Image: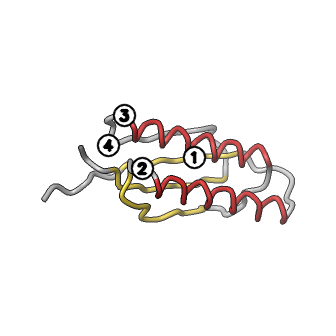
Amino acid sequence: MLMPRLAIVMITVIPHAPMAFLRIAMIMVTLRTVMDLLRTQMIMGIQHLVMVHHRIRTITEILHIVMGLRLIRMIMGIRHSQTVLHAIQMTTEIRLVINPIDR
Protein backbone atom coordinates (compact mmCIF):
# COMPACT_ATOMS: atom_id res chain seq x y z
CA MET A 1 0.00 0.00 0.00
CA LEU A 2 1.33 3.39 -1.03
CA MET A 3 1.76 5.84 1.83
CA PRO A 4 0.90 9.42 0.91
CA ARG A 5 3.79 11.84 1.19
CA LEU A 6 3.55 14.86 3.44
CA ALA A 7 2.97 18.33 2.11
CA ILE A 8 4.19 20.92 4.56
CA VAL A 9 2.79 24.38 4.12
CA MET A 10 3.94 27.34 6.14
CA ILE A 11 1.88 30.51 6.15
CA THR A 12 3.54 33.40 7.92
CA VAL A 13 1.58 36.53 8.72
CA ILE A 14 2.26 39.99 10.13
CA PRO A 15 1.03 40.71 13.67
CA HIS A 16 -1.02 43.89 14.14
CA ALA A 17 -3.67 45.45 16.43
CA PRO A 18 -4.28 42.94 19.25
CA MET A 19 -8.07 42.73 19.27
CA ALA A 20 -9.49 39.57 20.77
CA PHE A 21 -12.64 39.42 18.67
CA LEU A 22 -10.61 39.69 15.47
CA ARG A 23 -8.38 36.87 16.64
CA ILE A 24 -11.38 34.68 17.34
CA ALA A 25 -12.90 35.58 13.98
CA MET A 26 -9.68 34.63 12.26
CA ILE A 27 -9.34 31.32 14.00
CA MET A 28 -12.92 30.54 13.01
CA VAL A 29 -12.29 31.53 9.39
CA THR A 30 -9.14 29.42 9.37
CA LEU A 31 -10.87 26.38 10.83
CA ARG A 32 -13.75 26.78 8.42
CA THR A 33 -11.36 26.89 5.48
CA VAL A 34 -9.57 23.84 6.88
CA MET A 35 -12.89 22.01 7.07
CA ASP A 36 -13.59 23.01 3.46
CA LEU A 37 -10.20 21.59 2.51
CA LEU A 38 -11.03 18.35 4.30
CA ARG A 39 -14.21 18.08 2.25
CA THR A 40 -12.39 18.37 -1.05
CA GLN A 41 -11.25 15.09 -2.56
CA MET A 42 -7.70 16.40 -2.90
CA ILE A 43 -6.55 15.50 0.59
CA MET A 44 -7.13 12.65 3.02
CA GLY A 45 -6.81 14.58 6.23
CA ILE A 46 -5.04 17.27 8.13
CA GLN A 47 -2.62 15.87 10.67
CA HIS A 48 -2.10 18.98 12.68
CA LEU A 49 -2.66 22.69 12.67
CA VAL A 50 -0.01 24.41 14.74
CA MET A 51 -0.31 28.05 15.69
CA VAL A 52 3.20 28.85 16.78
CA HIS A 53 2.76 32.21 18.45
CA HIS A 54 -1.04 31.93 18.41
CA ARG A 55 -1.24 35.65 17.86
CA ILE A 56 -3.39 35.95 14.81
CA ARG A 57 -4.61 39.48 14.98
CA THR A 58 -5.88 41.29 11.91
CA ILE A 59 -8.17 41.12 8.92
CA THR A 60 -5.04 41.23 6.73
CA GLU A 61 -3.93 38.04 8.38
CA ILE A 62 -7.28 36.40 7.70
CA LEU A 63 -6.75 37.24 4.06
CA HIS A 64 -3.21 35.86 4.08
CA ILE A 65 -4.39 32.64 5.70
CA VAL A 66 -7.31 32.19 3.35
CA MET A 67 -5.18 32.99 0.33
CA GLY A 68 -2.61 30.52 1.57
CA LEU A 69 -5.22 27.82 1.99
CA ARG A 70 -6.56 28.53 -1.51
CA LEU A 71 -3.02 28.17 -2.81
CA ILE A 72 -2.75 24.82 -1.04
CA ARG A 73 -6.00 23.74 -2.66
CA MET A 74 -4.71 24.79 -6.06
CA ILE A 75 -1.38 23.04 -5.62
CA MET A 76 -2.99 19.86 -4.33
CA GLY A 77 -5.12 19.91 -7.46
CA ILE A 78 -1.94 19.78 -9.48
CA ARG A 79 0.36 16.80 -8.99
CA HIS A 80 2.71 18.24 -6.37
CA SER A 81 2.61 16.04 -3.32
CA GLN A 82 5.47 17.75 -1.56
CA THR A 83 5.26 21.51 -1.35
CA VAL A 84 6.58 24.20 0.92
CA LEU A 85 4.99 27.62 0.69
CA HIS A 86 6.37 30.72 2.37
CA ALA A 87 4.43 33.95 2.75
CA ILE A 88 5.87 37.11 4.35
CA GLN A 89 8.56 36.26 6.89
CA MET A 90 7.43 37.77 10.22
CA THR A 91 6.46 36.39 13.60
CA THR A 92 3.16 34.55 13.55
CA GLU A 93 3.19 31.20 11.80
CA ILE A 94 0.47 28.80 10.88
CA ARG A 95 1.68 25.40 9.80
CA LEU A 96 -0.55 22.99 8.00
CA VAL A 97 0.69 19.47 7.56
CA ILE A 98 -1.45 17.70 5.03
CA ASN A 99 -1.64 14.23 3.55
CA PRO A 100 -2.44 14.62 -0.13
CA ILE A 101 -3.84 11.63 -1.96
CA ASP A 102 -1.29 10.17 -4.34
CA ARG A 103 -2.79 9.54 -7.76
What mark, if any, has residue 11 been given in the picture?
1
Amino acid of disc 4: Ser
Q: Earlier in the sequence, mark 4 or mark 1?
A: 1
Residue that mark 2 sits on: 8
**Nearer the observer, disc 4 or disc 2?**
4
Picture quarter with the N terminus: bottom left
Q: Amino acid at mark 3?
A: Ile
Within 10 Å of disc 1 (Cα), the crowding (few <14, some 14-19, many 20+) is many
Lower sequence index among marks 4 and 2: 2
Q: Nearer the viewer, mark 4 or mark 1?
A: 4
Separation (CA) of disc 1 from disc 3: 19 Å
Q: What residue does disc 4 label? A: 81
Furthest residue in direction left, as rendered: 1
Label 4: few (<14), some or many (≥20) within 10 Å? Answer: many
Q: Amino acid at mark 1?
A: Ile
Q: Nearer the viewer, mark 3 or mark 2?
A: 3
On screen, residue 40 versus residue 88, left or right, reads left
Query: In the image, residue 74 lies at what x, y percent?
Result: 47, 36
Q: Are marks 2 and 1 in contact (CB under 8 Å)?
A: no
Where is residue 87 shown, x and y percent of the image?
59, 38
Callout 3 secondary element: loop
Relative to 101, 75 lies left or right: right
